[in-house]
Image (spheres, rainbow, N blue to C red):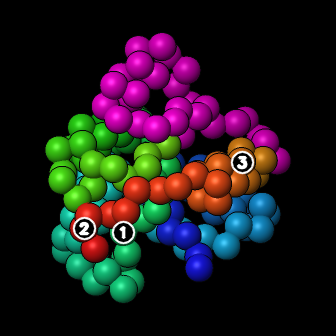
Amino acid sequence: MSKRVLIAEDDPSDAFLLKRAFTLANIPATLHFVRDGQEAIDYLQGDDRYKDRAVYPLPDLMLLDLKMPRLNGFDVLSWLRRQPGLKRLLVTVLTSSDQPDDINRAYDLGAISYLLKPHNSSHLSELVAQVKRYWLDLNQCPVALTE
């Protein structure tokens, strides 16, 4: 069964590279992209255009950028941890920020992993393959309470 990954990334170039990295790494995952934190919350709540869970299913894993318009990644993490049916969602921060304050804050808000965006596409493909191998293959994921 194909795993589902929600990717919150505001930069169209990074979104393209992530999609390409999943393809190059031969990862059979269904990818859903949102462009900012508010859109991520709308998706996870099933609001507006994301109501149809057959088309927009809850993800097995979320890759979350921190620096996004409207609501940032910290806002999304904070919101997620207050949602009874979503607080166990596996969220990996994927960002360009290597600031210790950002790293600590992300973990304090419930991120399960904090990864820096690589500077080239081959390293990104390797990183995506490692994320898939650990979080989607080896790791025993919690059961989602909200479906």
Above or below residue 138? Residue 98 is above
In-front residue for pair 83/31: 83
Q: The residue under label 2 is which amino acid type?
A: Thr
Within 10 Å of disc 1 (Cα), the crowding (few <14, some 14-19, many 20+) is many
Q: Which residues are magenta?
A: 94-123
In the displayed structure image, the side of residue 101 where residue 127 appears, left or right: right
Q: Earlier in the sequence, mark 2 or mark 1?
A: 1
Q: Looking at the picture, how far across and down is residue 26, in whole percent?
A: 77, 68
Instruction: Give the Cα distance between marks 2 and 1.
Output: 8 Å
Q: Looking at the picture, how far across and down is residue 145, in whole percent?
A: 26, 64
In the displayed structure image, the side of residue 81 where residue 13 appears, left or right: right
Q: Earlier in the sequence, mark 1 or mark 3?
A: 1
Q: Quadrant of residue 34?
A: bottom left
- Dot 1 corresponds to which residue? 58
- Confirm whether residue 108 shows in the render: yes
Q: Residue at x 30, y 40 (%)?
A: 77
Above or below residue 52? Residue 104 is above
Which quarter of the image is occupied by the N terminus?
bottom right
